[in-house]
Amino acid sequence: MLRRWMTIGAMAGALAAADAAAGPRGMTDYVYARVVDVEPIVRYVTVRRPREECWDEVVQVPVRDRPFVVAGPAIAGGLIGGAIGRQFGHGDGRDALTLLGAIAGSAVASERAARNRAYEGHVRETTVERCEVVTERHTEERIDGYRVTYQYRGRRDTIVMPHPPGERVRLRVTAVPVGYR
């Protein structure tokens, strides 16, 4: 039981010490003051905005206008490929390798002939759309707050607020006795 009273006494002493440290108390009231002026606090910032810019460009493309023009090289490549394939096969495999060699030789010779023909100046012009991302810079205004001038009891004062208050601003007024402890 004695312990309980000691704990209660210690807590009461701590509260009294905190109250004394806070100083003299007064009466708090809330009043409204008339707003005289509101001025935005402006800061200028540079903002980057990417945008896509596209244009049409004329390019030259190789033309494979007549595939039969490369028939001669394709036939010659097929014969050579078939002869090479026949050299490596035995029995039934010889026929299969001859066929594979002929097909491969024909394809390689045909592609090579078409490429050579394209390099010889057989090209056509076509329009292609090209695009790239361009970064633009803009300067923008940012409002950091509002400098508010108000009048209360004939005296003007200024405060900074995050938003405009309207026609009046709410003030907390505390009356504290002076000269008493």
Image: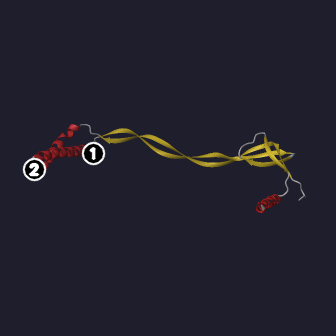
Count residues near mark 1 (Cα–Cα under 10 Å), then give few for <14, some for 14-19, many for 20+. few
Q: Which quarter of the picture shows residue 79?
A: top left
| Circle 2 crowding by C-alpha within 10 Å: few under 14, some 14–19, many from 20 | few
| Among numbered discs 1 and 2, the one appearing first in the sequence | 2
Q: Position of residue 43 (x, y in %)?
A: 66, 49
Residue type beneath disc 1: Tyr
Tell which of 129 and 8 is nearer to you: 8
Query: Furthest-right residue in view?
Result: 179
- Residue at 27 percent across and 45 percent down: it is 119
The quadrant of the image that shows the N terminus is bottom right
- Residue 25 lies, in percent from the top left, at 84, 54
Q: How many marks on residues?
A: 2
**For the residue labelled by badge 1, is the local secondary structure a helix, a strand or a loop?**
helix
User: Which of pointers 1 and 2 indicates the residue nearer the eye?
Assistant: 2
Rendered image: mark on residue 29: none
Cα separation, mark 1 vs mark 2, equals 41 Å
Query: At which x and y percent is residue 31?
Result: 83, 44
Q: Nearer the viewer, residue 13 or 70?
A: 13
In the image, what residue occupies the spot 78% across and 62% down? 2
Residue pictured at 62% horizontal, 49% vertical: 45
What residue does disc 2 label?
A: 90
Residue 79 in sight from this viewpoint: no
Could you tell whether 176 is left or right of 74 in the image? right
Is residue 134 in view from this perspective? Answer: yes
Q: Is residue 66 left or right of residue 145?
A: left
The quarter holding residue 17 reads bottom right
Position of residue 84 in the picture relative to residue 141 (left or right)? left
Q: Which residue is mark 1?
A: 119
Q: Quadrant of the C terminus?
A: bottom right
> Which amino acid, mark 2?
His
